[in-house]
Each structure stands twice: as structure tokens, then as C-alpha cells.
Amino acid sequence: MIENLQSKIARVSKILIEDMFQVKPGETVAITADLPSDRAIVDAFAAAASVAGGIPMIILVPRAEQESQAGMPYWPSEALTAALCKADVWIEANSMVLLYSDIWEIAMRDNKKLRYLIIGNSSIESLDRIFTGFDIQSLKQLLTKTREKVLACNTVKITSKNGTNVSYDIDLNYAFDIDDGDYSKPKFGTAPGFVNIVPKIGSMNGNIVFDFLQNGEQGSPLEFVMKHSEIVDVKGEKEAAEKFKIYLGSFNDPNMYKISHNMLGLNPKVTTLSGDVAEDERIWGGADFGFGHTSPMDMPPLGQVAKSHFDGVVTKVSVFLDDIQIFDNGVVCHPDLKPYTLNLLKN
């Protein structure tokens, strides 16, 4: 068991540093973590960076009580920002993430060479599923073709047998990102296997029934009623729904009720929910919905400033781009996309 775990850590670290980041001799590789982070994983990333000729820098900070901008009082923001503004690579392994905080926004804005990846406090089992066992170029082809079809439509509609039925318009001024596992150039990177869309402001309407909801009670599915891109009601088991309403209200921030982004999941190794949001967001044939803070990089020019950010996932979705269906109950069904899926799923 221990040998198997060590083998997975070594494999993930090598693939990330050598194949995905393509770290070069002399590059500074910053790895941020907090006290609950898995030091075995953090140390393995540092060791792999050294083997590749990079110069690792592990930065251990206190665990914040809340994520993103709400965590700023807990972190040494001035010193941490200064260090990250000089790094070539930043792997964020914090259990309470810096993502979307002022630290993150400034580093991403001012450090033009920065290649950033968030893994959070994911387990090695989850990281092994997310980052290994598929061909990067094949995934890039599928995601690129899917993104092209999204860019050509006006309205995205997502349904599911769990009761989800929601739609929104696109805005070509906003982000349409993909992550395929290539972090060799400056970018805001997350785990591979999705097409990310920032909906047009005020355009999302309908209902979303989550199979997994970050900060929600697992086993008690909740439904968001969306009107003009805002959560206007939370439905479900009474106690669970009330708890989530209290969670949302605790930020005292109206932007926490607003949609931030929608991701279409296409990681061929992620086929069941694990409870790890970094993995579940990318579930094959699913859809992720993020709420709260949106960076100006994704929603220019000002973004959607909020105190935090959270996500929820719907599995086995059907996706329609205008009147063209590309997913059917979790299966990629469009004839232009199916050949790429077959190549990925047989690996």
C-alpha cells in the first residue's frame, strides 16, 4: 500500500513537472501550501522540479478560515505577493485556496511569465486520475473542437434527468478557456479536461439541481433557482437548504449569488463523483457551475468582485448549443466530436 502510494506520487509529480509544465533549468518553481496540505505531495513536486533543473521554493502559510479574498487577513500578503511575482511556475496546494484573492490577482496580472496551476488539497488518488493516463494532444483536440462550437452559438442550454434545466447567452468578450494539461506557457491553469464559459451578464435563467455542491451537505441535493444570472432561491431538504442560505448570506455580498462560470466536463479519467471539487468539476459528460468572484482576466474589464467563490456539479448532462446537441445524458453525441472521444476513452 505504501509503495503503491509512493509510486503514484512519483508518477504525478514527474508528469506535472516534466510533461505538463516542461520546467527548464534555472526556473523558479513556487509551491504554496498551508498546514493541512499533504507534505508528501508538496515535497515530491519540489523534488521533481530539482530533477528537472528548476529551483523549488516551498511557501508554507497559515490555513485561512475562508477561501479567496475572504482569507486575506490570515496570509502574509505583501511578502507572499512579492515572491509569486518573481516565480516562473506556481503550484497552489493550499487547502484554503488563494485563488481569486488580491494576492492571486496581482501575481497573475503583474507576472507576465507566470504559469499557475491550482490543485488545492486534492488527494494523490484524485491527482493520479486527473493528470495521468491520457494523451495531452488528443484531449487538446477534443477541447478545442468543443470550444469552437460554443463560440459559434448564441445560447447554451443544459438539462439533466435530475431536473436541471437552465440556459444562458454567451458574450464573446468574455473567457472561453480550455485546460488540456499543457502548462508550458504563461497561463491561469487548472486541472485538465473542460471547456470553461463565462455567461453573458444577466442572461442565465432556469434551475440547477446539483449532484455535488461545494459547502453543501452531501446526500441532500439542492436546487438553485436562477433568474437573470442570480440565485433567487435555494430548494431541497429544508434543513440543508436553510444551512446553505445561511452560508451564502454570511458573506454579506450580493455578488456571491451571481453565476461566475460554467464548465463542460471532459476529463476521460473522471467518471464518478469523488467529493473533491477539483476532480468533480471535470467529470466526463458533466457540467460545473461556479458562483461568486470572477477575475477581470475572465470577465474584462472589471470582473465580478466577490469575497469568495464556490462550485457545484451536475452529472450526465445534455448540452444544446442553440438547437445543436453536443452532449446527451453524459455522452458526447455530436458527430464532429465523437471521433476524438473514442480515441481518448480507449486509452
Image (cartoon, rainbow, N blue to C red):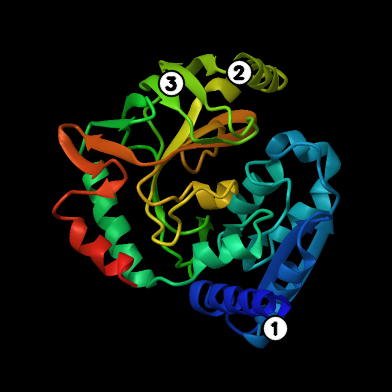
Using the numbered discs, state the Cα–Cα distance from disc 1 to disc 3 in whole angstroms.
Answer: 46 Å
Q: Is residue 152 visible?
A: no
Quarter that holds the N terminus:
bottom right
Q: Residue at x 83, y 37 (%)?
A: 73
Q: Residue at x 65, y 56 (%)?
A: 122
Q: Residue at x 71, y 66 (%)?
A: 30
Using the numbered discs, state the Cα–Cα distance from disc 3 to disc 2 in whole angstroms.
Answer: 19 Å
Q: Amino acid at mark 3?
A: Ser
> Counting residues from the N terminus, which is met first, the one under dot 2 or under dot 1?
1
> Counting residues from the N terminus, which is met first, the one under dot 1 or under dot 3?
1
Residue 104 on image: x %, y %: 66, 48
Q: Secondary structure at mark 1?
A: helix
Q: Amino acid at mark 1?
A: Ser
| 66 to the left or right of 294 | right
Q: Nearer the viewer, residue 183 or 283?
A: 283
The residue identified by callout 1 is 50
Residue 38 on image: x %, y %: 76, 62
Report if the CB atoms under discs 1 and 3 are less than 8 Å apart.
no
Report if the CB atoms under discs 2 and 1 are less than 8 Å apart.
no
> Counting residues from the N terminus, which is met first, the one under dot 3 or under dot 2?
3
Against 164, residue 19 (above or below) is below
The residue identified by callout 2 is 241
Residue 307 on image: x %, y %: 67, 30
Q: How many numbered marks does the figure carry?
A: 3
Q: Nearer the viewer, residue 343 or 239?
A: 239
| 155 to the left or right of 251 | left
Residue 291 on image: x %, y %: 53, 30
Which tag is nearer the camera, tag 2 or tag 1?
2
The residue identified by callout 3 is 229
Which tag is nearer the camera, tag 3 or tag 2?
2
Q: Amino acid at mark 2?
A: Ala
